[in-house]
Amino acid sequence: MELPEGTAWNRALRNNIFVFLACIINRIALFMCNKPGGSKSSAVPILINNLKGKMSKDSYFQTVPELVTASFQGSQSCTSEGIIKVFERADNYTLVKHCSELLPVIVFDEIGLAELSPYNPLKVLHARGK
């Protein structure tokens, strides 16, 4: 696992990368909620930079599909339609290339702010899970 220069390989970062990686490889949905400074946002770009499929530098990661992200920034003004669009964008990645080559992952940052939206956008997450 390559880390950006100056990155502290602390327990929080190791734990987050382990959990993210286990869920990504096994295609398990994960909602990582933690206090600020818990290395959640640091773990995501590290994984994106390492999971490049056959172009990965690490021989193990060459056996894993390339990670592509569809990002969504939660806010107090976000809507269900915005969340649906990010899921559609992730679904479209698998239509462009075969599912075995790419693994789309949705990164939903600041989900707590979306919870405060008067439009109740998080209800679509329940519908997507069925």
Image: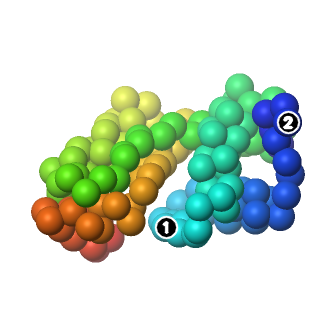
Name which residue lies at 31% across and 39% down.
89
Q: Residues within 10 Å of mark 1 (few under 14, many from 20)?
A: few
Number of callouts in the render? 2
In the picture, the quarter occupied by the C terminus is bottom left
Name which residue lies at 71% across and 26% down.
55
Query: How is the model colour-coded?
Result: rainbow
Does residue 26 show up?
no
Which badge, 2 or 1, is on the more N-terminal residue? 2
Amino acid tagged 1: Phe
| Tag 1 residue | 31
Q: Secondary structure at mark 2?
A: loop
Amino acid tagged 2: Gly
Q: Position of residue 88 (x, y in %)?
A: 26, 45
| Residue in front for this viewpoint, 118 or 102 | 118
Q: Position of residue 99 (x, y in %)?
A: 47, 42
In the rendered view, would you say 113 is above or below 4? Answer: below
Name which residue lies at 39% across and 36% down.
93
Name which residue lies at 41% across and 42% down.
71
Side (left or right) of 24 relative to 111: right
Does residue 95 show up?
yes
Q: Residues within 10 Å of mark 2 (few under 14, many from 20)?
A: few
Mark 2 vs mark 1, foreground winner is: 2
Which mark is on residue 6? 2
Q: Real-space Cα distance between discs 2 and 1? A: 27 Å
Side (left or right) of 81 relative to 19: left
